Image: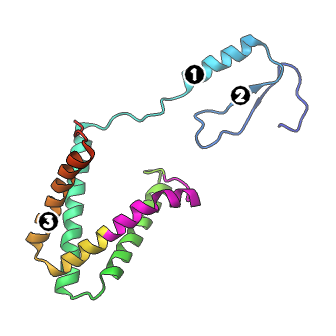
Amino acid sequence: SSSQAMKPGAMTQEKPTENAAAARVTIANGSAEETEKLIQHDAVSTPTDSPPPPTQSKKIGTALFYATSSLGVIFANKIVLSTFKFPSVQTLALMQFTSTTLALKAASMLGYVNLLPISVKGIKSILPLSTCYLLNILTGLSATQNLSLPMMVLLRRASILMTMLLEKWMLNSQPSK
């Protein structure tokens, strides 16, 4: 342990952190050769930081899952707001945000996603975007309550096209390939 006195050339192994691929080895008064060997060993044994690229079938599966989920949410919202005459768009949005948060936390605990820890700095940095997203969801749910389903789908698809065109015109950006 670090509390014991170290002899020249002795090696100690520290506890690995979550981000460490292997335990870090430090040398107390060790030789340059030992240090070089450990550096080379660490470089060889450390896995790459980026995961392998997704396969074509995984990409297609992800797109199909997203399309199915998106349409399912639209239909469910339309049924809840129109057929069952649910009175509060805000309550429906709150329930959806809560279920999404719980699903993300469960996915994080199972290791599927890595969530950053919550901090005041992080909240301040994403607050403007989160506010815009909240307003977008609330107006979208209000529109879902008052419009027919085909008109709602058309407006939602047209808004993506309009966003792309306005981004090109106002920001002079080029689409990525």
Counting from the top left corner in percent of width and height, residue 67 is at: 20, 57
**Is residue 59 shown left or right of residue 151?**
right
| Disc 1 target residue | 43
SS for tag 3? helix
Residue 45 placement, left or right of 82: right
Q: What residue type is labelled 3?
A: Leu
Give the percent coordinates (x, y) of residue 96: 35, 72
Q: How crowded is mark 3: few (under 14 residues within 10 Å), some or many (20 or more)?
A: some
Q: Is residue 35 above or below residue 4?
A: above
Mark 1: secondary structure: helix
What is the spatial separation of the Cα atoms under label 2 and label 3, in whole angstroms? 59 Å
Judging by the rendered image, the residue that carries numbered circle 2 is 25
Residue 163, located in which quarter of the rendered image? Answer: bottom left
Magenta residues span 115-135
In x, y percent, where is residue 111?
Answer: 47, 51
Q: What residue type is labelled 1?
A: Ala
From this view, report whether residue 150 is shown above or below residue 174.
below
Q: Nearer the N terminus, badge 1 or badge 3?
A: 1
